[in-house]
Image (cartoon, rainbow, N blue to C red):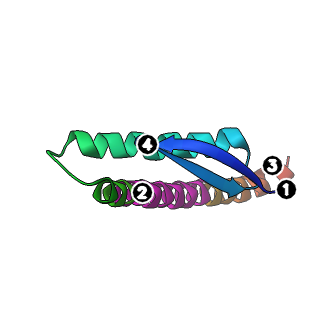
Amino acid sequence: MTKTIDVEIYGQRYSVNGEADESYVKKLAEMVDTQMKQVAAGMRSATPAKLAVLAAFNLAHELLESERRFRQDEADADRRVASLMESIEQQMPSILSR
């Protein structure tokens, strides 16, 4: 069921239409608002549109870094599982001969 959720980002009110949980939508808006304020703090002057683009750029960077870390962690886990499986397979003959 589509609903409208009002949020505030960088002093502007927006109505978001969708099926997502209200607390989730508000959390997203809070993340964007925080990112825009952080970008603005490091600049002397910028339009809200420029801040929004820079905030989106930073959030995209965070997303890609998170995905990279996830892939790395997944590859590390796969290597550990393969190593454990190899160790178990090497021990199987001695365990079965007891």
Q: CA distance from mark 3 to mark 2?
A: 44 Å
Secondary structure state at the residue bearing disc 4: helix
Foreground mark, 2 or 4?
4
Q: Residue at x 42, y 54 (%)?
A: 59
Q: Nearer the viewer, residue 83 or 46?
A: 46
- Residue 70 place in picture, x, y as percent: 53, 56
Magenta residues span 57-80
Q: Earlier in the sequence, mark 4 or mark 1?
A: 1
For the N terminus, the image quarter is bottom right
From where the camera sits, is residue 72 visible? yes
Q: Amino acid at mark 4?
A: Asp
Nearer the viewer's eye, disc 3 or disc 2? 2
* Residue type, label 2: Glu
Q: Secondary structure at mark 2?
A: helix
Which comes before the other along the chain, label 2 or label 4?
Answer: 4
Residue depicted at 53% across the width and 54% down the height: 73
Crowd tier of the residue under label 3, counting other residues whose Cα lies within 10 Å: few below 14, some 14–19, many 20 or above: few
In magenta stretch: residue 30:
no
Kindly report the distance in space between the C-alpha atoms of the residues bearing marks 2 and 1: 33 Å
The local crowd at label 1, few if under 14, some if 14 to 19, many if 20 or more residues have their Cα within 10 Å, is few
Distance from the alpha carbon under mark 4 to that under mark 3: 60 Å
Q: Is residue 69 above or below residue 11?
A: below
Q: Tell me the kind of residue under disc 3.
A: Ile
Q: Are marks 3 and 2 in contact (CB under 8 Å)?
A: no
Would you name the residue on which mark 2 appears? 65
Q: Which residue is mark 1?
A: 1
Nearest-to-viewer mark from 1 and 3? 1
Residue located beneath label 4 in the image:
33
